[in-house]
Image: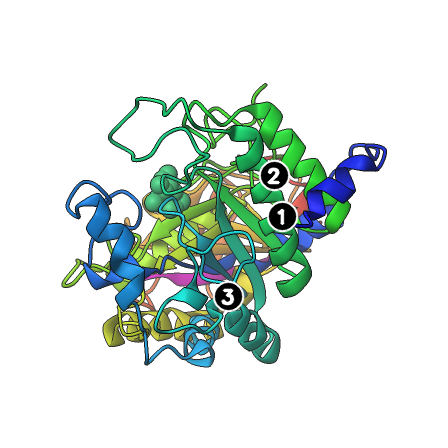
Amino acid sequence: MFTVCGAIAQQSTPTFLKTPKDKIDQFMDMRFGMFIHFGPVTLRGTEIGWSRNQQVAQDDYDSLYKEFNPALFNADAWVKAAKDAGMKYLTITAKHHDGFCLWPTSYSGYNISNSPFKRDIVGELAKACKKQGIVFCIYCTVLDWHDADYPIHNPNDKKFNVKGDMRAFVNRMKNELHELITNYKPTMLWFDGFWEEPWTKEYGQEVYQYIKTVDPSVVINNRLGKGDPTKFSEGSVGDYLTPEQQIGKLDMVNPWESCITICNQWAWKPNDSMKSLKECLQTLAKTAGGNGNLLFNVGPMMDGRMEARQVKRLAEIGSWLKQNGTAIYSTKGGPYKPNDSYATTRKGNKIYIELFKKDGAMLTLPAIPGIKITKAGWLSGNALTFTQNDGIKINLPDTLPDENVSVIELDIDKNAELIPVI
Ligand code: FHN
């Protein structure tokens, strides 16, 4: 078989390219994206990848694709749910650790075209995103417990299969990435699975560099490397940090994106518990307040529909963002560190305070040296009185305008983005 890699491998190695900063900045300005974990495992309602050879016997798990037929899948409906939530990008698990490919790849028969459904889920989502103005992104695993060339064959068996061939595995991954990048033009690639021993920083560097030769502008998360994904280190490979199931720490230097589930499980689980609107909105506010993005995960059901309750929750988030998105999109985090009572964001000469609860009749904030507040009010309109001679004290009404997150807008006399973190 002609392999794209073979041809490219014969070219001289290009100068090592990094993703242009403006592409990363544009990605960070979006602040809010949808993560989707989907695959034949939805037929069992257990966790994608991890339930293979656990709750689901390995042969049973690996045969699920033969009955996988999400007949009610509608890419436009999924993308509309993201858009109605105020999300600006969408990331689909094109291939998770179980190795099943949601696109008709030429490099593995374990793919959607060989299921009863047959249709290209990745391609239909890419098309729907383009049509609805949502940025399309792809999740790719760097471990594959189904692939005979990958030396570990399930998450609970740390024995290496000596018959594994990582060179063949990485070449196949590069061929698959060439398909995904050239056919679907993702803005960002979300890698995952870096923690197992067969994957090395060197493979990560090789794949990162290969991607740059296919499309230099693709933004790449830091899970092509090794080590703690919440901080850059010697083992890091990638453009931004990826705290998981936690809100990242305020960081005005390193871009980061928290990936968090709307329920508990990444893939669909019947009757899973779902986060309240308060928790969803305060998570989004604290993420933006930390200068990061929120990649919020939904797991569609086996028939291809998203749960109605999840779609409703997403629409409730979108309603809040219709009123308050100015305080989230294209802002920077800070200048105050997020806490249990509020988060803050800023842009130009404005500081936005995302207020979660009242701790008294006034909101008291530390003074900002050299800064004068010229106006204060709810983002929804009504003015607020304040003093700023001994710290900042903003007088609050008995009841906050929004029971979950109320946004105050402060006009100041200088560029708020230049204020050091307080
Ligand atoms: O093992 C995966 C898990 O299934 C899920 O995809 C999350 C999402 O970031 N990442 C890994 C766990 O760290």
Find residue 118 and report its horizontal and vertical position in percent.
Answer: 42, 72
Q: Residue at x 42, y 71 (%)?
A: 85
Ligand 1: does it lie within 8 Å of the C-beta at label 3?
Answer: no
Mark 3 residue type: Val
Find the residue positioned furthest to the front. Answer: 1
Q: Are marks 2 and 3 in contact (CB under 8 Å)?
A: no
Mark 2 to mark 3: distance in Å?
21 Å
Range shown magenta: 404-411
Identified by mark 1, the residue type is Asn
> Which residue is outermost to the top?
234
Q: Which residue is mark 2?
A: 171
- Which residue appears at 47% of the width and 56% of the height? 94
In the picture of the structure, the residue carrying the numbered disc 3 is 122
Q: Nearer the viewer, mark 2 or mark 3?
A: 2
Mark 2 and mark 1: span between their CA atoms?
Answer: 6 Å
Please identify, in this view, whether the residue under mark 3 or under mark 1 is nearer the observer: 1
Residue 202 among magenta residues:
no
On screen, residue 301 versus residue 198, left or right, reads: left
Kindly state the secondary structure of the residue where label 2 is placed: helix
Spot occupied by residue 67 in the image (x, y as percentages of width and height):
26, 67
User: By what rule are the colours in the image chosen?
Assistant: rainbow
Query: Can you tell me whether the CB of the residue at mark 2 lies under 8 Å from the nearest atom of ligand 1?
Result: no
